[in-house]
Image (tube, rainbow, N blue to C red):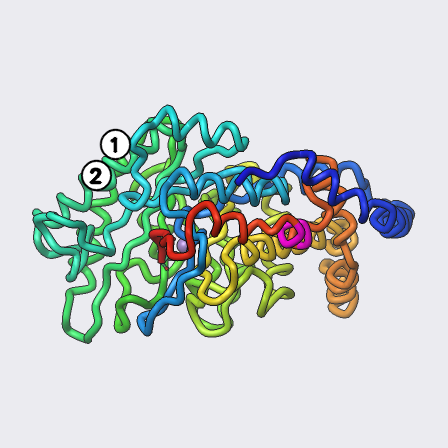
């Protein structure tokens, strides 16, 4: 199924006058307070978030998986799903592929399909957390960190192959997330595992084209429950530094122990020019993969405050690669992604409203109360009319979720693909 501009215009029509009232009301008051509305709208329009190919079907847990009907069963269909998201929201202009789940059969056809939806290929992701069919070595006891040299070599070769696939698609970055670690004390030697990982990453780094970046993810636990080799941002930063200037840390919101101050991590990395990529999701306990902003929207806003500050003040940091990284267990994945995209834009728009000049003055005057007021004043502003206008300007939907339902997208996908089609994913 393809959503056309006409579909969107027809549905927008009935919401247009309400939107106009809300937009005028908000922007009059923001403009009176000195905000530059066209510049905010432009920033919102430019903020594109990649959709991971593994999040378009139902995810699961170790207790099972409840399928979602009409899931995309091929890479072509995954691209079509991102096309639907992008047509409605105008903020999902890229797809991030996971290899070997999404190896294209016909590269030209895949590229043409993505271009027809105006979708780019974002970072390619390697997979050394599962054993592949007919693989010689097993990753049960690690991949890049494995004590067995031939397993490490296999994992390095896989990453190089992923780079080669990404090059044919026009991707410009590789994301490495390792499940490597230990389940029990004494199982592995921390120093050996870290040294092997660094050596292996350096080998992969050598295969990186000049205009590429490599993003190194960290995660404190799971699937290993005693230790993870790249457990935190510091370890990732150290490895990225050991690799070179094209290597960066990637922050995934779900990869922190409870109550970690993620906004401070973001600030530190941006000051060092090493925040390369960002994975959005939400959680209450760990890597829960919940809809962005569904549990801790204020925390997300504080993180965006740090991101906006970094984007404006840290030329040493490249523009980060944004991606949603979630797994949808009980909601329609496309509806869930629409909600996540909205939450991301909302947090970003609110962060753009923080008066950074006044905040700096209040910080210097040690006026702690005013500092809090300035943040919360921005946070409490209902910015949704700005989001709607930015979408409208890009040809998107005023109300993507309503439009998705009014167009019966899921029903049509089920008709086209069947009730029991299954997507590869997490
Ligand atoms: C596992 O936690 C994970 O969600 C990582 O964040 C990766 O980005 C993703 O899987 C795909 O490998
Ligand atoms: Mn991730």
Residue 251 seen in this snapshot: no
Query: Does 329 sit left or right of 354 as displayed?
Result: left
Quadrant location of ligand 2? bottom left
Percent position of residue 76, x then y: 40, 38
Percent position of residue 398, x then y: 73, 46
Magenta residues, as a range?
Answer: 402-406
Disc 2 marks which residue?
203
Query: Does 96 sit left or right of 397 as displayed?
Result: left
- Residue pictured at 11% horizontal, 50% vertical: 151
Q: Residues within 10 Å of mark 1 (few under 14, many from 20)?
A: some
- Residue pictured at 66% horizontal, 55% vertical: 347
| Residue 404 lies in the magenta stretch | yes
Label the magenta part by its dominant secondary structure.
helix
Question: Which residue is nearer to you in this view: 67 or 112?
Answer: 67
Residue 60 seen in this snapshot: yes
**How far is mark 1 from mark 2, CA to CA?**
7 Å
* Picture layout, residue 163 above or below residue 238: above
Find out whether the residues at labels 1 and 2 contact each other: C-beta distance under 8 Å: yes
Q: Secondary structure at mark 1?
A: loop
């Amino acid at each position: 199924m393809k959503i056309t501009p006409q579909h969107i215009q027809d549905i927008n029509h009935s919401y247009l006058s309400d939107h106009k009232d809300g937009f005028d009301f908000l922007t009059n008051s923001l403009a009176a307070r000195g905000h530059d509305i066209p510049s905010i709208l432009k920033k919102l329009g430019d903020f594109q978030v990649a959709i991971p190919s593994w999040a378009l079907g139902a995810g699961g847990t170790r207790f099972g998986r409840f399928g979602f009907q009409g899931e995309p069963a091929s890479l072509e269909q995954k691209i079509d799903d991102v096309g639907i998201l992008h047509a409605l929201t105008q903020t999902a202009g890229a797809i991030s592929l996971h290899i070997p789940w999404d190896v294209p059969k016909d590269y030209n056809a895949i590229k043409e399909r993505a271009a027809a939806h105006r979708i780019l290929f974002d970072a390619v992701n390697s997979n050394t957390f599962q054993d592949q069919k007919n693989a010689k070595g097993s990753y049960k006891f690690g991949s890049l960190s494995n004590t067995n040299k031939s397993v490490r070599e296999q994992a390095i070769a896989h990453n190089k192959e992923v780079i080669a696939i990404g090059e044919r698609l026009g991707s410009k970055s590789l994301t490495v997330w390792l499940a490597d670690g230990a389940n029990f004390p004494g199982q592995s030697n921390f120093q050996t595992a870290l040294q092997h990982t660094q050596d292996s990453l350096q080998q992969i780094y050598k295969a990186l084209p000049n205009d590429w970046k490599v993003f190194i993810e960290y995660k404190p636990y799971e699937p290993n429950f005693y230790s993870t080799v790249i457990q935190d941002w510091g370890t990732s930063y150290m490895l990225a530094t050991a690799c070179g200037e094209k290597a960066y840390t990637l922050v995934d919101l779900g990869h922190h122990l409870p109550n970690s101050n993620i906004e401070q991590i973001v600030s530190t990395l941006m000051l060092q020019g090493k925040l390369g990529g960002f994975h959005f999701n939400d959680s209450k306990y760990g890597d829960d993969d919940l809809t962005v902003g569904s549990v801790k929207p204020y925390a997300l806003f504080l993180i965006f405050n740090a991101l906006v500050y970094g984007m404006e003040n840290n030329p040493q940091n490249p523009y980060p690669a944004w991606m949603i990284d979630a797994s949808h267990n009980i909601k329609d994945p496309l509806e869930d992604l629409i909600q996540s995209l909205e939450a991301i834009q909302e947090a970003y728009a609110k962060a753009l409203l923080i008066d950074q000049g006044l905040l700096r003055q209040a910080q210097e005057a040690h006026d702690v109360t005013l500092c809090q007021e300035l943040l919360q004043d921005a946070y409490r502003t209902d910015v949704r009319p700005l989001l709607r206008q930015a979408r409208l300007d890009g040809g998107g939907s005023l109300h993507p979720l309503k439009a998705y339902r009014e167009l019966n997208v899921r029903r049509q996908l089920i008709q086209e693909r069947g009730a029991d089609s299954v997507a590869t994913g997490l």
